[in-house]
Image (cartoon, rainbow, N blue to C red):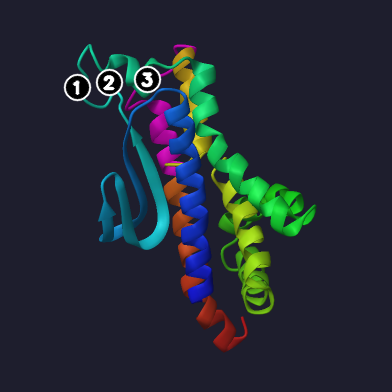
Amino acid sequence: MLNLLFIVYICLFVHLFSIAAAGRVAGVRVLEISIGVGPVLFRYKKFILKLIPINGYVKFLDSQEHFVSDADLPFAFDQLSLMRKILVILPGCTVLLLLAATLNGADAWQDFCTFPTQFVTGALSPFDTAQTLLHTASKLIQTSSFLSLLGIAAAKLAAGNLLPLVSTNGSQLIIFVAQRLGLVKPYPGPIHKFVAFVSIACWISWLLAIVSTPVIKAYGL
């Protein structure tokens, strides 16, 4: 289990620092890079490491979120064109997939492509399909080498970050395109609310699946 936690931290680090690096190349000012949620374990300048390795973010200078002086406006993320925004966001998932391919070869692509279906079907069936997927994951954790497991996790997290859920690159890309087409307000708007509703429903379903696993195993359900 400690290996898995360390692997998730590595994947989050790779994902977020790839986005931050792409932002720097695009001329955007990076304000903060935060990995995980919960109590802060470590802080150094713009980098924050938190206790629970779930989620994370790169905070760019953005005039839609806070006041930005005229002198600093050229360094704001929201001043980028749509294509440059996409080129800043996508490297996180791209580098994760490249890491997975380096470690696991062609299997990485299969891990990447199957994850969206696994996530959705598991969320729709927390006491059946999700249990099968969790059992398979448990066996992989126990039998796979550290590097192989890192490759699997990197591919899965790359795919997961492209799903249209809250705080994922997928939802960011959809909102960028919708804003460019004038379909939504910056925040909040109908698309934001819909994404939030779907995300909460999915995560509650998966949480039920994880919590109920010991009971299902104990009673052979």
Question: Which element is circle 2 on?
Answer: loop
Distance Cα–Cα, label 2 vs label 1: 6 Å
Whether residues under marks 2 and 1 lie with C-beta atoms below 8 angstroms apart, the answer is yes
* First reached walking from the N terminus: tag 3 or tag 2: 2
Residue 182 among magenta residues: yes
Find disc 3 in the rendering and name its residue. Answer: 78
Residue at image location 47% in from the left, 27% down from the top:
25
Over which residues does the magenta segment extend?
181-198
Find disc 1 in the rendering and name its residue. Answer: 67
Residue at image location 44% in from the left, 58% down from the top:
204
Question: Which element is circle 1 on?
Answer: loop
Residue 215 among magenta residues: no
Q: Residues within 10 Å of mark 1 (few under 14, many from 20)?
A: few
Q: Position of residue 50 (x, y in %)?
A: 32, 59
Find disc 2 in the rendering and name its residue. Answer: 63
Is residue 163 in view? no
Is residue 74 in view? yes
Instruction: Say left or right for 156 vs 2.
Output: right
The relative height of residue 121 versus residue 67 in the rendered view (above or below) is below
Q: Amino acid at mark 2?
A: Ser
Residue at image location 48% in from the left, 23% down from the top:
85
The relative height of residue 213 versus residue 198 in the rendered view (above or below) is below
